[in-house]
Amino acid sequence: MISYVDFRKDILNKKTNTVDFVKSIFIKIEEKKHLNAFISLNYENAIKQAEESDKRFSNNTPRLAEGMIVAVKDNISVKGLKMTCASKILENYEALYDATVVTKLKEAGAIIIGKCNLDEFAMGSSNENSYFGNVLNPLNEDYVPGGSSGGSAVAVAASLCHISLGSETGGSVRQPASFTGLYGVKPSYGRVSRYGLTAFGSSLDQVGIFSSNLEDLSLALDIISGEDEYDSTSVKKEKLDTLSYLNNIDENEKITIGVVDEELLKHSDFDVLEIYQNAVAKLEKAGHKIVEVEFPFSKVWIPTYYIIATAEASSNLSRYDGVRFGFRAEVEEGEDLIKLTRSQGFGAEVKRRILLGTYVLSEGHHDAFYLKALKARRVIFNNYKEIFNKVDTVFMPTTPSCAFKFNSKADNPIAMYMSDFYTASANLAGVPAISLPLGVNNDNMTIGMQLQTDNFKESEMIKYSKIIEDVLGK
Ligand code: GLN
């Protein structure tokens, strides 16, 4: 994989220049076309921006992320490029403005090379729900890359960019990061602006980052975070500076790590369990304090997530009606335009979610499902608050299994939904979480473990990640 930190050193040592590097990336993208990581490319603009970066490097005025090559999930707006959300309904839709995260990256000198494949409207865990076809896992092409940000993960894992942006509603960055051997972060709810991110479950959604190392991830996170007048749910905080935490680690610092009990671990496959337990033993031996934490409501994590996410999705997706924008069905007289457009424009999983969401919000079921789920969410949040009074960070598997083969879960939505078992609770509670690549199984498929911290403690979380990684090795 390629790292921005190394690239920047190479530039300063005159080993490469941005234009040549960007060109070499596009050649690689062409070679790896069969992985299907990208839906569209931004060749001309990228070269233009690279020329600008080279000028700035030679004038000694490079910006923070000068020449950083970034791939963007295709549910995030980049002005002038198509934004399909991997759906037929937006197949020809062109974004009219930049998402705030994109503006910030561009202003820092980053180069957007293209838009990445995903599960339609970010709904899925395997990238098998894209209108533009499956994305293949570069570690083994018979396996899924995870989802919904599968294309963004593969773009980094196959060395087609330095970092990529994904989105998280219930684990869509952490899970594919685990399946492809990457770092994947979901910030606290409100840390990063959602302006320009296509809404799925608005109270859960956050933009996240994939990278091959912690430095690149920190740099990008510091750049994209911050309050934004265009997103009233973004929160005013002191400027995030995770990079300085990462660069100032006290080697002797010991932390209190919350580990999970058997009840939670019974969801894990043996290979995941083995790596987890070995990691915990090594961390304890290295002098960190290990405390078992309890999640008595873990049974309701997935049901609560799928009720709230689908309820919000059914409302958010009502805007795709064939009138305002996107695909419009051909109708004969007497036919219903909206019905036909939505029937033809959405794929099966999106329809399933709209149906489920409409049902849980409907009169007669609203109290039993939706209101109940909101109450459960509060209980889950309180549970986290209590836990973070006792420990610095919670450490648990990112996913119950390693990457699985294509079609192994596609016909079984419940099995597919269970792959979010360890991730969705952080979205429900709004806490930040990061998946670290901490092992491989006998088939050489990667396994990620995640850290979660209290709200808005991203800097500490990155620091703990480094401390833990130093003990466990990569
Ligand atoms: N796999 C989860 C879902 O399908 C998470 C999706 C996401 O985080 N965007 O809802």
Image (spheres, grey):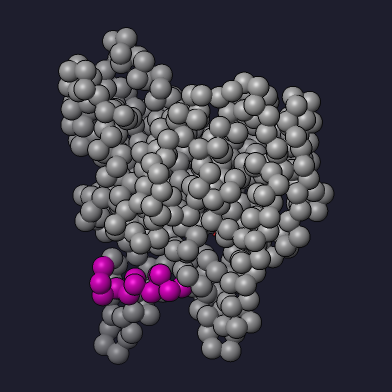
Measured as percent of width and height from the top left, residue 179 is found at: 59, 40
The answer to which of 210 and 226 lies nearer the viewer is 226
The answer to which of 340 and 367 lies nearer the viewer is 367
At 42% from the left and 67% from the top, the residue drawn is: 346
Task: Give residue 113's quadrant in the image.
Answer: top left
Q: Quadrant of the C terminus?
A: top right
Measured as percent of width and height from the top left, residue 252 is found at: 65, 22
Q: Is residue 442 above or below residue 79?
A: above
Is 262 displayed left or right of 202 in the figure? right
Q: Is residue 439 visible?
A: no
Q: Is residue 215 visible?
A: yes
What's drawn in magenta, residue-wise? 314-325
Is 143 displayed left or right of 28 in the figure? right
Q: Is residue 450 above or below residue 63?
A: below
At 39% from the left and 25% from the top, the residue drawn is: 4
The answer to which of 128 and 93 lies nearer the viewer is 93
Measured as percent of width and height from the top left, residue 329 is found at: 30, 73
Q: Residue 351: say if magenta.
A: no
Measured as percent of width and height from the top left, residue 249 is found at: 55, 24
The answer to which of 163 and 320 lies nearer the viewer is 163
Q: Residue 321: say if magenta.
A: yes
Q: Is residue 425 above or below residue 108?
A: below
At 33% from the left and 84% from the top, the residue drawn is: 336
Is 262 displayed left or right of 441 in the figure? right
